[in-house]
Image: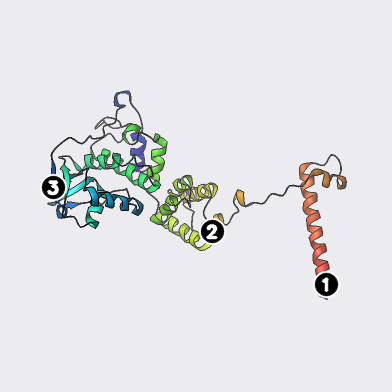
Amino acid sequence: MSKEDNFINTLFEKTEENKETEAVKPQTTEIVQMPMKSIVPNFKNPYKCREEDMKPLEDSIRENGIIQPLMVRKDDKADVYEIISGHRRFLAATRLEMTEVPVVVLSISKEEADIILVDSNLHREHILPSEKAFAYKMKMDALKKQGKRTDLTSDPVGPKLSADEISETDSASQVKRYIRLAKLIPKLLSMVDENKISFSVGVELSYLNKTEQTDLFKFIEKELCTPSLAQAQKLKKLSQEGTLNSEEISSIMKQPKPNQIVTVKIPEDKISKYMKSNATVKEKEDFLAKAVEYYGKHLLRQKDRGAR
């Protein structure tokens, strides 16, 4: 088990004394006007600025200005201020060629800022799987850097963490599954976002290494088909055994999916008069298979005679 997976497992061991989330709450402070050139986005921000959200926001800012100030913090290494909350407002202000925006400057650490960034956006109505994946991972990494306990065998460096510290809506197991998605290559992760690959399938494929994932995507792109959950689990098993390659990927992906197998139903009274009364289901299936084969050969003979 990797160090990250071990930390994730530890993260969700609940304790009675640690039921409340420790997410940082921004303090109330002075609103100031800050030059746009002094502000930079958090380049690891997991949330995307969707174009359909930007137009109404730009119209509102054009008419009313920025009502809710951005939250920023002083960068640890450069003479700029990093956005904690307000990335969409900052983008809209950039497009509107504003020279300054209202901000609240918080004196907090980078880890505390990342936690606020994640928590302040999880309430959105539409969040893509990739956004949750990297948001939960960002918060997990921030908590880890704060010196929280990361294993259960050594002396603790801090209290155990509870699932509530990562998400108030998703269960511990679901959060772990989202974090797994962050291991997908971008092209496969985009397919999960677009519902071309289901969430469960994406989680299974996250256990493939980057080369295996790339080979799989090439097959998907060429053959225009996606793996079922059963196929994804087979791919994961072979990957963990170290035997997965492009040939195995092709072989597994070409196997028919359950919903692709056509089932034909024939009323029993239509064949019962040609069979013994106590025939088993297997005997009936064999009889029908032979009958279809025989009739198929009959049609071919007729076709050959007509061609002469």
Mark number, residue 250: 2
| Sooner in the amino-acid sequence: mark 2 or mark 3 | 3
What is the residue that sits farthest to the bottom in this orientation?
308
Q: CA distance from mark 2 to mark 1?
A: 41 Å
| Sooner in the amino-acid sequence: mark 2 or mark 1 | 2
User: Which label sits in the foreground, 1 or 3?
Assistant: 3
Where does label 1 land, which residue?
306
> x, y (%) of residue 294?
81, 58
Mark number, residue 33: 3
Total tally of numbered discs in the picture: 3
Q: Amino acid at mark 2?
A: Ser
Query: In terms of image quadrants, where is residue 122?
Result: top left
Mark 1: few/some/many CA within 10 Å (<14, 14-19, 20+): few
| Disc 2 to disc 3: CB gap under 8 Å | no
Tell me the quarter of the image containing the C terminus: bottom right
Mark 2: few/some/many CA within 10 Å (<14, 14-19, 20+): some
Mark 3: few/some/many CA within 10 Å (<14, 14-19, 20+): few
Question: What residue is rendered at 84% in x and 44% in y?
Answer: 272
Q: Amino acid at mark 3?
A: Gln
> x, y (%) of residue 240?
46, 48
Instruction: Name the one closer to the observer, 284 or 92.
Output: 92
User: Which label sits in the foreground, 2 or 3?
Assistant: 3
From the viewer's perspective, is 263 left or right of 237?
right
| Disc 2 to disc 1: CB gap under 8 Å | no
Query: In terms of image quadrants, where is residue 9?
Result: top left
Q: CA distance from mark 2 to mark 3?
A: 58 Å
Q: CA distance from mark 1 to mark 3?
A: 90 Å
SS assignment at label 3: strand
Q: How is the image coloured?
A: rainbow
Tell me the quarter of the image containing the N terminus: top left
